[in-house]
Amino acid sequence: MKIPVAIAKGDGIGPEIMDATLFILNAAGAELELHEVEIGEKVYLRGIATGMDPKTWEVIRHTKAFLKAPITTPQGGGFKSLNVTVRTTLGLYANVRPCVSYFPFVDTKHPEMDVVIVRENEEDLYAGIEYRQSPNVCQSLKIISRQGSEKIVRYAFEYAKRHGRKKVTLFMKDNIMKFSDGLFHKVFDEIAKEYPDILNEHWIVDIGAAKLADTPEIFDVLVMPNLYGDILSDVAAQIAGSVGLAGSANIGDHGAMFEAIHGSAPRRAGQNVANPSGLLLGAVQMLVHLGQERVAERIHNGWLRTLEEGIHTYDIYKEGVSREKAGTKEFAKAVAANLGKGPEQLPPVTYKSFPHTPAPPLSEGPFEDRKLVGIDVFIYHKPPLTLFFSRISHIAIGPLHLKMVTNRGVRVWPEGQPETFCIEQWRCRFLGHDNVAVSQHDLIQILDAFDRVGIEVIKSENLYTFAGKPGF
């Protein structure tokens, strides 16, 4: 029986590369029942902020996968990222991006590169929780949870196990973001112990990114939080040969979406020049996900043979290596003609079927006694500190008193330095001696005290200890 799949042709070059991909899928004998939906720019401009009609959710929900071409998000505010909306709404927590060198047929400085980036897909700064707090200050909240970290880290190790990979590497920045990235790192170390046959290591993301750009062959499977993964998977795809060659899978417990990693390139639309390879390789990942491994192999190996024959689209065409500069349609016809053939120099691709095994229940983490001990009050006031300090320095409720004032995370009182540049958002920390417990009512009274002295509070953050250790 044919498997129902939702497809969206998208914007810009999207319709062209989708038509080319579907042509190859059909020629290869993919058993798919296609259900087309409209998403993207036209839907945005009809006044739907998500770029997708609510009825489309039902189509996607009742199919087994969603194959999506790139879309264009209109300029201006008020439009949400459709990719983020689909990923978070459907719980597609794992983004998987293989970045492979096809040297010498595609130019690269890294002929031995074969890296898979597994990116957390629902949390981090991509949660999109943002606020404009004053005329000149905006805030984005970085959300990292134990549950989200556990799901993606386990997925990375399971991916390595199933695909014969030898090592999983974590990129994070917990030397600075000790709680958020620190939690991701802690979960990684816990889960790594469950896979003794797979090597594990961790890198601070800045030096890790430098090593990825310089010597990617030392990495195998990389796992990282959302923002780092988004940036570095594009970098990895480009240094492997071209962003235009990379496909992407978004996997969850109740659905999956497949796409190219590049954008809609509207300036190239309608010219029959776009490379359909990224979307095609995303479709190959989809076929494997749907259990059609043999069809996936036929397409992938036929595509590799086409690269070897030097039939290349403009983005990877190179004199002396390429034989023919093919348009989008012509490239698709060349791949279709090579179905059933395999590469002669590049390694042929084989795919295995893996039975679905549900992941173990998510852990609740260690029990830690949680105690409310204070509050950070963020206020709006023009610099300098002397303009308002005398109005707040006397505030004290029960055990709570003013402990510290910071600006952009830098302490300006007590013992501030005159060189520190300040903006109009200030953080005023109230704590008791030795982190004594306080009540919610105490915090409300602190906020009320700011109102009484005419200082505008723009947000507050409760302060807790966990097992006696500060969580701030």
Image (tube, rainbow, N blue to C red):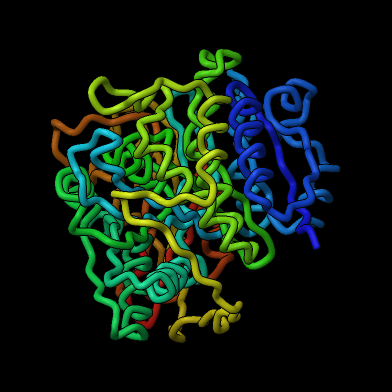
Q: For the image shown, how many numbered marks are present on the structure?
A: 0
Between 400 and 131, the residue placed more toward the observer is: 131
Residue beneath the point at 72% across and 26% down: 44
Q: Whole-percent x and y of residue 169? A: 27, 64
Front residue of 12 and 179: 12
Residue 237 vs residue 19: left or right?
left
Q: Nearer the viewer, residue 356 or 431?
A: 356
Is the residue 9 above or below the residue 286 in the image? above
Q: Position of residue 306 (x, y in %)?
A: 43, 38
Q: Say if 13 sits above or below 25 in the image.
A: above
Residue appearing at x 51%, y 57% in the figure:
297
User: Residue at image x 29%, y 42%?
Assistant: 240
Measured as percent of width and height from the top left, residue 11 is found at 64, 25
Whether residue 457 can be seen here: no
Front residue of 240 and 440: 240
Residue at position x 48%, y 37% in the image:
277
Where, quadrant-wise, is the C terminus in this rendering? bottom left
Q: Is residue 413 left or right of residue 37?
A: left
User: In the image, residue 445 lies at what x, y percent?
Assistant: 55, 57
